């Protein structure tokens, strides 16, 4: 890049106007449905483009599934299949049950040879992109369930592709970031070449997350890295701005106006950052926050746990790498008020119809399990009335208004 700016000043706390939002707590706590079918942990969830009618999931079983989260029948239940290593929800049953209703599986997409780690849907909903352990970016036709292109020529050289996202006018570009420390930009419209049009290689460790500035041009690309940096590339001006964080960066979520970005890192903190000057506006999670609120208990030190903006950007919503403190295998979702940083909700995420224990190994003994909730998506880019979460159980749980 032609110019570089390193904003490594200590994190400072600015104060929002806490009177700016005086609405009631209407956080959607009700479980609307569960999305079943995965034969392994779910690593990626995303809604279709506005209005967000459908949900896509990416799984360790190398498959992508498209669901309608609205149940066909509120009384349907499930059975489970037990393997030598773990138990996952596999097929529906008509037996009566008190478990949440099932969403409807519309289509399954199966071309990946390895786990699926990231998904991005085009604004037209006609195509979507996926990435994972294959060292290639897949471009799919939604209706035919076939791959249109695979971007791999002079692509990521080692390890996984952790993140992929559409960018540019009319989704003309795909941007990918991977374990090989590079960000690569691909031209979707070009039929003559599958080589990247640009490679950004400033990171010193793997790229975990990507975001693109709103407005259509996609001129600014944000890349979060294990090296504890968020790098903002202005690809038109040839300028790079680097913001430094205390831990490996694992999650990025841009506000709709592009002025702030939510950054999750492995120091057990989620930060709302002012992009214009690199100032920290608010901190969430950890052992507490600047307001002295008893929001401690949320920790993130080991794995990538996603955090997003939701409820019209009133809330910060994050998964949980620890799970609930009970024997039912529940996961947890944490929610904070964006402006005050106070804890709004801590929801239990059921493992699924399989129950509270899992058979592990050939001895047939039941052992406790932990439902790590690692991926979160909010309908309509954070402005809908619904969100969904996924993780190690292989079940995606959909929450909405009561």
Image (cartoon, helix red, strand yellow):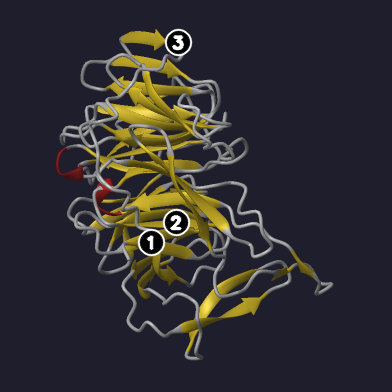
Q: Nearer the viewer, mark 2 or mark 1?
A: 1
Instruction: Using the rendered image of the protein, determine whether residue 60 is visible from the camera's viewpoint.
Output: yes
**Residue identified by numbered label 2:** 389
Q: Nearer the viewer, residue 180 or 55?
A: 55
Count of picture labels? 3
Which residue shows up at 70% across the image and 69% down it?
358
Which residue shows up at 47% across the image and 42% down it?
161
Mark drawn on residue 169: none
What distance separates the C-alpha of mark 2 from that of mark 1? 8 Å
Disc 1 packing (10 Å; few <14; some 14–19; many ≥20): many
Instruction: Determine whether the residue tagged by mark 3 lies in a helix, strand or loop.
Output: loop
What distance separates the C-alpha of mark 2 from that of mark 3? 33 Å
Disc 2 packing (10 Å; few <14; some 14–19; many ≥20): many
Instruction: Determine whether the residue tagged by mark 1 lies in a helix, strand or loop.
Output: strand
**Residue identified by numbered label 1:** 399
**Residue identified by numbered label 3:** 8
What distance separates the C-alpha of mark 3 from that of mark 1? 38 Å
Contact between marks 2 and 1 (CB within 8 A): the answer is yes
Query: Among all residues in the image, which is located at the extreme right?
Result: 363
Q: Measured along the vertical axis of the image, is residue 304 above or below residue 95?
A: above
- The image quadrant of residue 242 is top left
Q: Measured along the vertical axis of the image, is residue 397 above or below residue 164?
A: below
Contact between marks 2 and 3 (CB within 8 A): the answer is no
- Image quarter where the C terminus lies is bottom left
Which residue shows up at 30% across the image and 21% down it?
275
Residue 215 point in image, percent of width and height: 15, 34
- Image quarter where the N terminus lies is top left
Contact between marks 3 and 1 (CB within 8 A): the answer is no
Residue 220 point in image, percent of width and height: 26, 26
Which comes sooner in the sequence, label 3 or label 1? 3
Q: Nearer the viewer, residue 125 or 359?
A: 359
């Amino acid at each position: 890049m032609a110019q570089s700016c390193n904003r490594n000043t200590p994190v400072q706390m600015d104060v929002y106007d806490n009177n700016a939002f005086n609405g009631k707590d209407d956080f959607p706590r009700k479980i609307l449905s569960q999305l079943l079918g995965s034969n392994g942990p779910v690593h990626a969830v995303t809604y279709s483009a506005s209005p967000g009618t459908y949900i896509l999931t990416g799984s360790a079983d190398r498959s992508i599934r498209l669901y309608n989260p609205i149940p066909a029948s509120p009384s349907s239940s499930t059975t489970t299949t037990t393997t030598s290593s773990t138990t996952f929800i596999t097929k529906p049953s008509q037996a009566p049950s008190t478990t949440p209703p099932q969403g409807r599986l519309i289509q399954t997409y199966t071309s990946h040879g390895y786990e699926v780690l990231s998904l991005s849907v085009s604004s037209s909903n006609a195509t979507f992109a996926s990435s994972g352990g294959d060292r290639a970016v897949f471009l799919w036709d939604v209706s035919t369930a076939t791959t249109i292109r695979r971007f791999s020529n002079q692509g990521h050289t080692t390890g996984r592709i952790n993140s992929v996202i559409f960018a540019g006018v009319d989704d003309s570009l795909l941007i990918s970031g991977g374990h090989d420390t590079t960000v690569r930009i691909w031209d979707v419209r070009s039929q003559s070449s599958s080589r990247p049009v640009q490679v950004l290689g400033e990171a010193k460790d793997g790229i975990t997350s990507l975001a693109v500035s709103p407005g259509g041009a996609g001129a600014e690309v944000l890349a979060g890295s294990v090296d504890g940096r968020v790098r903002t590339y202005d690809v038109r001006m040839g300028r790079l701005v680097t913001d430094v964080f205390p831990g490996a960066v694992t999650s990025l979520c841009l506000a709709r106006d592009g002025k702030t970005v939510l950054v999750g890192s492995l120091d057990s903190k989620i930060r709302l950052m002012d992009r214009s000057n690199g100032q920290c506006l608010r901190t969430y999670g950890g052992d507490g926050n600047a307001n002295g609120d008893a929001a401690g208990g949320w920790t993130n030190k080991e794995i990538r746990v996603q955090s997003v903006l939701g409820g019209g950007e009133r809330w910060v919503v994050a998964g949980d790498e620890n799970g609930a403190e009970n024997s039912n295998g529940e996961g947890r979702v944490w929610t904070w008020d964006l402006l005050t940083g106070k804890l709004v909700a801590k929801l239990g995420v059921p493992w699924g119809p399989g129950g509270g224990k899992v058979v592990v190994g050939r001895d047939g003994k039941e052992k406790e399990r932990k439902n790590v909730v690692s991926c979160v998506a909010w309908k309509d880019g954070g402005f809908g009335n619904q969100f969904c979460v996924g993780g190690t159980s292989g079940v995606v749980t959909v929450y909405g208004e009561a």
